[in-house]
Amino acid sequence: MMIDKSKLAIDIQGVDVHYHGFAALRDTSIQIEHGTFSGVIGMNGAGKSTLFKVVMGLVRPTRGRAIVCERTPRQAQKIGCVAYVPQSEQVDWDFPISVYDVVMMGRYGAQNIFRSPRGDDRARVEGALERVGMAEYRDRQIGELSGGQRKRVFVARALAQGAEILLLDEPFAGVDAKSERALTELLVSFKAEGKTIILSTHELTSLTEYCDHVALVKHTVVAYGPTEEVFTRDLVSHTYDGIVHRVAFAK
Amino acid sequence: MEFFLEPLQYAFMVKAIIVSSAVGAVCALLSCFLILKGWSLLGDAISHAVLPGVVIAYILGIPFGIGALFFALVAVLMIGLVKNHTKIKEDAVMGIVFTTLFAFGLILISRTASAVDLMHVLFGYVLGISDGSALFTIIAALSVAALVLAFRRTLLLYCFDATHAQTIGIPVRFVHYSLLTLLAITITSSLQTVGIILVIAMLITPGATAFLLTKRFGAMLEIAVATSVGSSVSGAYMSYYLDISTGGAIVFVQGLIFLAVFAYTLARPIRERPAKGIASEPKQA
């Protein structure tokens, strides 16, 4: 896919999203550049997931515009430039499907309507599995993995898809500290290759170690920018209605 | 040998075995997707909802498959419509839609057809199936089976992770309604074999049995089809020798197989069991 990385990865301007008359996001704007690692934080129900859905083209804003890789979200879907790593609780871990099968699903968008894998697809799946260190588990049923391994399978799927933008929805829930570190190191290495990483998280303590940008969400994007400018006591405290303890702020 | 060959001297038995097997196979394929998607109740709903279609087709003298399919699609659309425009949860919506349509069918049947006809619609009568109906059933079953197998990867992705399907540009809504339509055709084609009530079992039990035995979806499809076709054939023989309801025998055998497999999975050493979601690492305090 042809993507000009000097342009914005995500450009959202003045977006409103309503669900059944309730405003999930109001007048929301955010511009994210390629090759950045952004942490999206905010309370539950603050609109983090809705923001992700706008980027993925799953909800249509009632006002404003969303541009992803210089395209509408729907056109961006077609070229597979956005990949989504779901929350663990959204996945049926008893599903009779192997690690390899899940990663192969990353290739479906590029295949014919019967989704029959070709040599190139298999090579990409193998490569993605190697990259996340899950090659030896390829035949495991997905429920037979630890929390950290489960995440890496879905990250491998995003790689196999060839996505430029990776959205991860609370990837550290149910993952121990060691696995969290392994996962963030992997994601940072993707960033170094020019991919754009965006993750939502409640782990405020370790955020500054890997996120170069932070977005604060409270029914709109309160602030977005370099971590040292945005991840401050005042702004984070505002985002969390003043309830913030023992967090290493930038200032 | 005589035991197996004797019933085959009769054309109605040969027809019954072939039709039951075709229906068993296609129901088994769909059951794998339905139980993974959590749609078992939807099969229940659609199968009841086709009753008025069958009766109206009977009144008009058109092939009853057409009426059944029409009402199956009416039920699907009504369930979708009510669910999308109210706060009522899907199971309650399905309950309202299918019981109302079923009741409508009962009203129609009470004015037009005999109690015997009602019994045949509700519980099937494969031994009396006409050549035309048999042909319709087999063609419908084979068509649905071919489509499900051809598009199994897309259907499986839709069941497993519809969000991912949508983010890579798969037309999820189209896949959703296609799967429902295939389900409606399958139920319609199964009516004469096992009837409205027992087709529900055909759409759940084979997939559930296979799910207990394997962690691979491909194997799940194979096991489901094998147990379902096996049940159909043995059910047909049982009904011949014991003079019992064919549909009843088929579904009863399916249930027995499920129980046997369930007992086997309990008796099996723990390390060989398919893991049931090994605990994720405890979250760091």
Image (spheres, coloured by chain):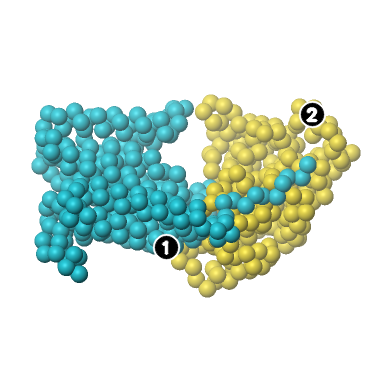
Chain colours: A yellow, B cyan
Q: Name the residue under label 1.
A: A114
Q: How many labels does the image show?
A: 2
Q: Is residue A116 something that shows in the picture?
A: yes
Q: In which quarter of the image is the C terminus of chain B?
A: top right
Where residue B244 appears, as percent x and y from the top left, is 19, 48
Which secondary structure, mark 1? loop
The residue lying toward the viewer, choosing from A156 and B21, is B21
Where residue B106 appears, as percent x and y from the top left, is 20, 31
Q: In this view, does A128 lie to the left or right of A250?
A: left
Q: Which amino acid does label 2 sit on?
A: Ile
Q: Marks 1 and 2, Cα distance to the nearest angstrom?
A: 51 Å
| Pointer 1 or 2: first along the chain | 1
The residue lying toward the viewer, choosing from B258 and B176, is B258
Mark 2 belongs to chain: A
Residue at the spot x=45%, y=66% of the render? A116
Q: Which amino acid does label 1 sit on?
A: Phe
Mark 1 vs mark 2: in front = 2
The residue lying toward the viewer, choosing from A195 and B4, is B4
Mark 1 belongs to chain: A
Q: In which quarter of the image is the N terminus of chain B?
A: bottom left
Q: Residue B156 carries which label?
A: none
Residue B218, quarter of the rendered image: bottom left
Q: Is residue A173 above or below residue A2?
A: above
Q: Name the residue under label 2.
A: A243
